[in-house]
Image (cartoon, rainbow, N blue to C red):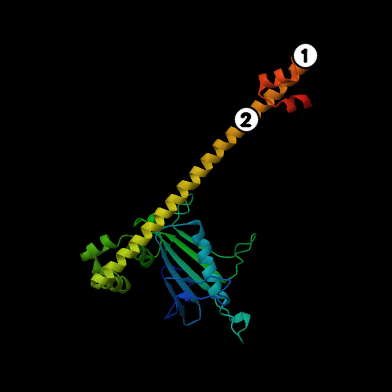
Amino acid sequence: MNALLPLEPGHEILEIEYMQTELVPDTPAIVKNSIVDVRCKDTLGRQFIVEMQMFWSNAFMNRVFYNASKVFVRQLKKGIKYKKIMPVYALSLVNENFEKDIDDYYHHYQMRHQKHSSKKIDAIHLIFIELPKFTYKNHSEKKLTVLWLRYLSEMDKLMSMKEEKFSLPPEILEAMELTDESNYTPEQLLAYDKYLDAIRTEEMFREDAEEREAQREAQGEARGEARGEAKGERKKALMTAKNLKVLGLLSNKQIADATGLAIEEVEEL
């Protein structure tokens, strides 16, 4: 988190305490509860939410903001003053590109003054990292930041580079050792398979929903075109009937038969 979050020098995290990941609402009948991947706080009282998301949806950013806001507000317990409320950081590692028109993979959202961007409210920080956009060629970042992103996006490749391990920082070495040791039991493998299946099912439902929406839009356009054509034909028939009626050569019934209009419509012209 020290490597990936926008923490100012001298304000790095020294120690964390893990907290309950289920955010149960104060009014269950009205507000829904939610579960985050990791939630913790440091010695200063700042709270951190870390989530990993395989697929992006437009609602995900609102969900992250909702959870961070809930954590921020709940600091104000009885007897606590507003100035004691600490910032909340929400770090989301996303395995899909969602900012299609931006090349950067690192996105930090914070409340700022519209005209004077240096003026900001240090309350809620939303940090999204698009892992597919990250490449090892990004040398401008801090070394540890690059290594953590490599670990997250190229774990298999990094694990195979045994000769490089001795030059890696202890944090990365420890993570790699833990990865090496994490042999799954049959029960864990079954749970992991179910997890992957849930992700694939979610993606399938999303694709189906998008396909249905596209079909509805296409059908709506077709109906709109058909209504437009029918309206044009009716206007044309009314004009023809009116001209025939002015000539006075045909009866109302004959005009109705010729134009396809109801005889009552012809009589009203």
Query: Is label 2 in a helix, a strand or a loop?
Result: helix
Measured as percent of width and height from the top left, residue 116 is found at: 63, 62
Q: Amino acid at mark 2?
A: Ala
Asked if residue 127 is positioned above or below residue 137 in the image, the reply reads below
Front in this rendered view, residue 147 or 243: 243
Of the two numbered discs 2 and 1 in the rendering, the one whose residue sits closer to the viewer = 1
In which quadrant is the N terminus drawn? bottom left
Foreground residue among 229 and 146: 229
Judge by depth and name the residue closer to the eye, 68 or 107: 68
Task: Give the residue number, with chain letter if any, for mark 2.
Answer: 230
The amino acid pointed to by label 1 is: Leu
Residue 182: x and y in percent read: 26, 72
221 with respect to 256 (left or right): left
The answer to which quarter of the image holds residue 55 is bottom left
Q: Residue furthest top?
A: 249
Instruction: Specify whether 131 is left or right of 267.
Output: left
Q: Residue at x 74, y 28 (%)?
A: 264
Q: Element under label 1?
A: helix
Residue, x 50% and y 71% (percent of image)? 89
Please name the residue that numbered disc 1 is placed on. Answer: 247
